[in-house]
Amino acid sequence: MSIRHAILGFLSWTPLTGYDLKKLFAESPTLPWSGNNNQIYTALVELYDEGLVSKEVQQQQDRPPRKVYSITAQGRAALRQWVLSTPELPQIRNTFLVQLAWADQLTDGELDDLLARYVDELHVQRLMLQEQRQRGYAAPARTPRETLLWDAIMENRISGYENELAWARKLRESLAGHVMAFLAGEEQ
Amino acid sequence: MSIRHAILGFLSWTPLTGYDLKKLFAESPTLPWSGNNNQIYTALVELYDEGLVSKEVQQQQDRPPRKVYSITAQGRAALRQWVLSTPELPQIRNTFLVQLAWADQLTDGELDDLLARYVDELHVQRLMLQEQRQRGYAAPARTPRETLLWDAIMENRISGYENELAWARKLRESLAGHVMAFLAGEEQ
DNA sequence: CAAATCATGTAATGTGTTACATGATTCG
DNA sequence: CGAATCATGTAACACATTACATGATTTG
């Protein structure tokens, strides 16, 4: 996959400039791109060269010319084909798991503190997503089914964090139980 | 984070060559690196230049010289400091969610088929991880607490897939219900 | 006889980020 | 008066992957 498909996706709704797209990516809590210029502007040039988008240049005084891109029939076909293509598995890059892998060098207290900090961060993130969901997060809402899909995407992110939270809390308890068992052994 | 920390982690167990590390990364189901040469060999040179690892060169006939790297006291300190550093949130890159975002152009049948394929892939992946867990997946097992941590890491991956599976199945049902509601509306 | 193992390394390419550059206008 | 908005684009850098390159030895 690449950002090019997501750009085609946005353009399938309405014509947009690079600047518009940049903002859409930056604001979206679900799309995995920051919305940096370099990627978007070069991708648009490529898509244009391949005939997947068309371009209308609007001259302005005292400003760079606006370049409004629209999806072409070819672009729509490419988007559709990509949407139908066999899904990839989610790629998860969890730094914390790598930290945990070598966390046995820490004291019980340090390890518990590390887990507590992780739980806190997950908690904050979950709250933020829940608020965004309640605010409607700039939903497009074109058909009832599309609304259902976008809700499901939001739900996916939130449930991911909830699952991670449950896991982290359970691990904290396991480790606490482990310490207690050790102390009980010491006493005898 | 970078692969450099994971390399220090492995070297904190025992001295290793670049080739050994390459295999460890390639075999690990939890570490998010493929184990390609370029990264590992250049990282080792950097770590050596920074004094975090030491090197013993063993000449061989008819083979490149073996370079066995060991972690230094400085390296151990750096590893410990990194393990104690504030955890990052997991970075999830789920292509399928992006496909779903623009899947409203599909027919109900195409959409259901797409979801079915996603469910299948998740299912296969979960089974593979469960088998690896049962086989012990080359666990290091140095202390009981470390065993607990490595088990928790495995459990994290598996529960992630289970959560994703539950979400996907629920969405399939929702969509089926949506189609039925639509058909019921048609009839009137 | 082909392939895997051992063991090092480099080159090319893809993908993504931050920062730099320009310059008028509007908002707090 | 500084910051944000509009609107384009480039440069430098970080991280990761595949493929290329060498060459003996062992295994199926």
Image (cartoon, coloured by chain):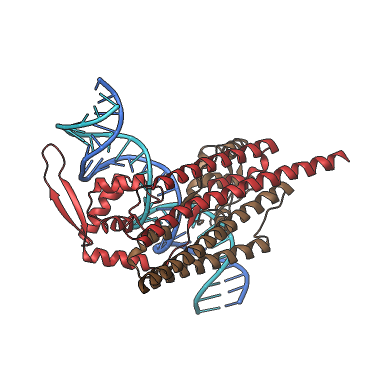
Chain colours: A red, B brown, C cyan, D blue
**Image point 41% across, 51% down: which residue?**
A30
A147 sits left or right of B135 in the view? left
**Image point 53% across, 62% down: which residue?**
B165
Q: Quadrant of residue C18?
A: top left
Residue A83 visible here: yes
**Image point 44% across, 52% down: which residue?**
A154
**Image point 25% across, 45% down: which residue?**
A19
Give residue A180's position: percent from left, percent from top: 77, 41
Q: Quadrant of the N terminus of chain A?
A: bottom left
**In this orientation, which residue lies closer to the viewer: B178 or A163?**
B178
**In this orientation, which residue lies closer to the viewer: C11 or A134?**
A134
C26 sits left or right of A4 in the view? left
Most extreme residue toward the front, as rendered? B188
Q: Quadrant of the C terminus of chain A?
A: top right
Residue B11 visible here: no
C22 sits left or right of B65 in the view? left
